[in-house]
Image (tube, rainbow, N blue to C red):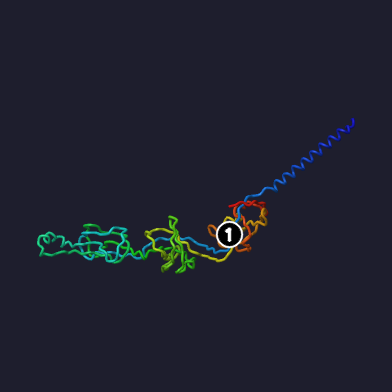
Amino acid sequence: MSPVPPYYRSASCSAVLALLLTGCGSEATTADEVLAVRTPVTLASMRRTAIAEEVGLNATSVFQRKNSVRANIAGFVERSFIRPGDHVSAGQDLYLLRTKEARALGEITAQDSSFRVKGAITVKAPSSGLVVQVDRSLNDYVNDGDQLAVIADENTFAFIVNVPYELNAAARIGSICTVLLADSSTVEGRIAAQLSAVDPVAQTQGFVVRPIHARNLPEGLIGRVLLRTRYRTNTQVLPVAAVLGNEEMSHFWVMRLIDDSTAIAVPITKGISTHDSVEVLTPTFSGTDRIILTGAFGLPDTANVIIQSP
């Protein structure tokens, strides 16, 4: 076999060298691109404030006192002055009753003015309140003692909440609570009393929650009473979005910036959690520490980031 000419050997070496240099250049470029990748994030800072843990329990509105309006004679209802939903004052006229004897002698009374048989009785409201029930209407016949209407005492309006017995400590008499209604409005209330019996099946005890401010609400309204079970003041609090956890929710951490472009994972111990905030028991952060609020999901323990305005 004839030897390879020298100029062929030179050309081959040059080609191989060029290929090697090209490969090395590609690897260097790829590494640079990887290092240049940064995740956009927004930041939050640690706050020292109060945080409370609450439990929501169903409650139903009631009028605790209702006064029955009753007939004091046997006769016919000649006039009715009330309708359901009316507000009445104590002593206000509600019904005009006339005995059947007086009605039978009505024509004679009209012809002879000296024959005076009236037999009319006016039934008055025993107390102020709201008319919640009207049982008799015009021309109804009633016996002595029959119920004519029911008046609810508005001063006794309250929510009855059934509290599991293990949470009775959270329902202290005199404590303030919030009642959340179906229209998303709220009523501030105070726990005024506890009922004397416990439901033997559910093991719950009824508590009376009275609204602090007067408000025209109907009976039978279902609300949700928020009772405070735990409360801490001057503690470390972060937005809930800033706290990350594993699938089992047994370990938690936050991503803290150590410079303007690098974040590291910092394990934490959680305390009280609410729908929007989390208490951080350990470690202790300073007010200048920058914690990633959004963009931290899926980041490694050390990550390159770019800060964006929220």
Residue lying furthest right in this view? 2
Nearer to us in this view, 307 or 251:
307
Above or below for 249 versus 33:
below
List x then y, in percent, for residue 116: 13, 65
- Depth check: give the residue in front, 51 or 65: 51
Task: Give coordinates of residue 33: x percent, y percent.
Answer: 70, 45
Residue at image x 52%, y 62%?
53
- Left/right of residue 180 with respect to residue 309 in the rendered view: left
Q: Amino acid at mark 1?
A: Leu
Q: Residue pushed farthest top?
A: 2
Query: Which residue appears at 25% of the width and 63% of the height?
Result: 93
> Which residue is labeled 1 in the image?
238
Mark 1 residue element: strand
Q: Residue at x 67, y 51 (%)?
A: 304
Classify residue 11 by image quadrant. top right
Q: Residue 289, percent across and down?
A: 63, 59
